[in-house]
Amino acid sequence: MEDRAKPGPGNVLEFRLPDLGEGLADAELVSWSVSVGDAVELNQTIAEVETAKAVVALPSPFAGRVVELLAQPGETVLVGAPLIRVQDDTAVPSGQESATNGAEVAGDAPGAGRTAVLVGYGPEGETVSRRRRPVASVATQSDSSRRPVDVAAEPDADESFAHRGAGSESPAVQSVSPDIAVSGSELPEDEAAESFSRRARPSLTTTRAAATPAARRLARELGIDLWFVAGSGPGGAVTVEDVRGAVPVSQPRTLASQSQAAPVATAPAVTDPDAGLIRPSARELRTPISGIRKRTAAAMLASARTIPQASTFVTLDCTASMELLDHLRSTKSFAELTLTPLALVAKSVLAALAEFPEINVFWDEANQEIVTKHYVNLGVAVATDRGLLVPNIKEAQSLSLRDLTREIGWLAETARSGGASPTDLRGGTFTITNVGVFGVDTGVPLVNPGEAAILCLGSIRKRPWVFRDELAIRWVTTLGISFDHRMIDGELASRFLATTASLLEDPLTLLSRI
């Protein structure tokens, strides 16, 4: 690790939202772990942000005392936008205030004015200019990651997420925005795991709408309720122009048509005497699109637009599998595990993928290649209070049924508690979704971008079934597969699905494939 100069005494250090290594341009601030006036230590968790369907804990890249929080929980913050300012605890020697205020820290020497590489952060990037950022924010200064900024000289820009200082004696601000490394190529797996806390996400009970600080101040001055102002800024944040365009009671907007057509009955508007606005009636509820819902929508839109998809189905008698599960649950090996049909389906899918590796592929559009993967990162769709998450089991093809059972249970619990890391949610090669737990017979899921197929497991119920030429009551389920028709033909998908079904009809045949 290269030596980095420690920021000089009396400096205000500004921490900007780092590149989380996920190819995303923003993140939603979930909560602060510190308040103004608190002392923070190196690597202490200062905030949690949500991005790529995961809640990530941000450690502090320096020690000092918090002087300003530049974003509010629920706000969407751009990569490179300032998050927090911390005052160096070391006292400024007499006579040096004017020299350090607005001046460069530690000169222009290589590495000067930078903080050390910390646990949870990769090497500092060249700049964050490759990311979309607020136009007039502190972070947009040339070489701002290395040079202090005189806050008093900054204009109060509408697009900025930072609160601006007003005094002429504001100390120098040094912007710091190291990259967090989460992929295997940037940090070893064990270090990446330590870098992100697997913790439950606090419930979002904030009563504040997402807005820039300047817009929030103007709204307070005009008495406008930001919840009822449509935002046009990054992530739907309300800007100053949005606030100025809000309609007062004296000039209400009408929903009725200006034409001479017959009037349409609408719910009456409700006047808010405090805000001075026309509120929508209680018959409608508008929820900002953010967080997991925003990410899921983007992924599904990309799937529908870029992947030509087809589906096929098979209904099967899985009585033998249910009997095997009942037997295994009574054994010592599975005594402390929750063994479900999903684990046996996963094991059957892995065996079928070994026979049909053409299913475990990826369409590389840039290089015009079909990439066949000789490993399986098995995704398992999990319904959570925050939306649908798809963590995946790394190298699942090498796991036993017992290990699969344990991993599926652990991933589901972690995802529901909000502790799934970006590593858990990236790199899937094949996915299983279980709609049967909701009492649904089958479904047509969309293929996850970066994969070629997804298997759907329907409900397992006792139904009339012809067994050995006689009508009997058997356990029956339906499997469906959606696939990328650019790489997988109907014949290949049908053979793969039929093989998976046959393994569930006679699960003892799995022994010959393990």
Image: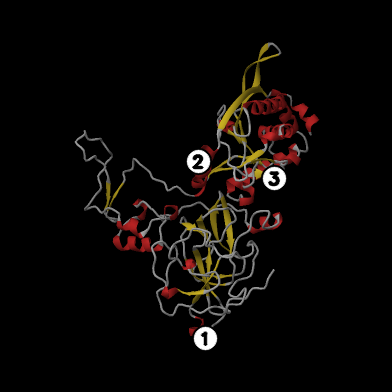
Which residue is denoted by mark 3 in the rendering? 394
Identify the residue shown where x is 25% and y is 44%: 254
Q: Secondary structure at mark 3?
A: loop
Which residue is denoted by mark 1 in the rendering? 96
Foreground label between 2 and 1: 2
Q: Is residue 336 visible?
A: no
- What amino acid type should be assigned to the residue bearing mark 2? Leu
Disc number at residue 301?
Answer: 2
Foreground label between 3 and 2: 2
Q: In the rendering, at what x and y percent does residue 160 appear?
A: 43, 63
Q: Secondary structure at mark 2?
A: helix
- What amino acid type should be assigned to the residue bearing mark 1? Gln
Disc number at residue 402?
Answer: none
Residue 57: quarter of image? bottom right
Q: Residue furthest bottom?
A: 95
Q: Residue furthest front?
A: 368
Distance between the alpha carbons at the discs numbered 1 and 3? 55 Å
The answer to whether residue 314 is left or right of residue 36 is: right
Between residue 15 and residue 154, name the one nearer to us: 154
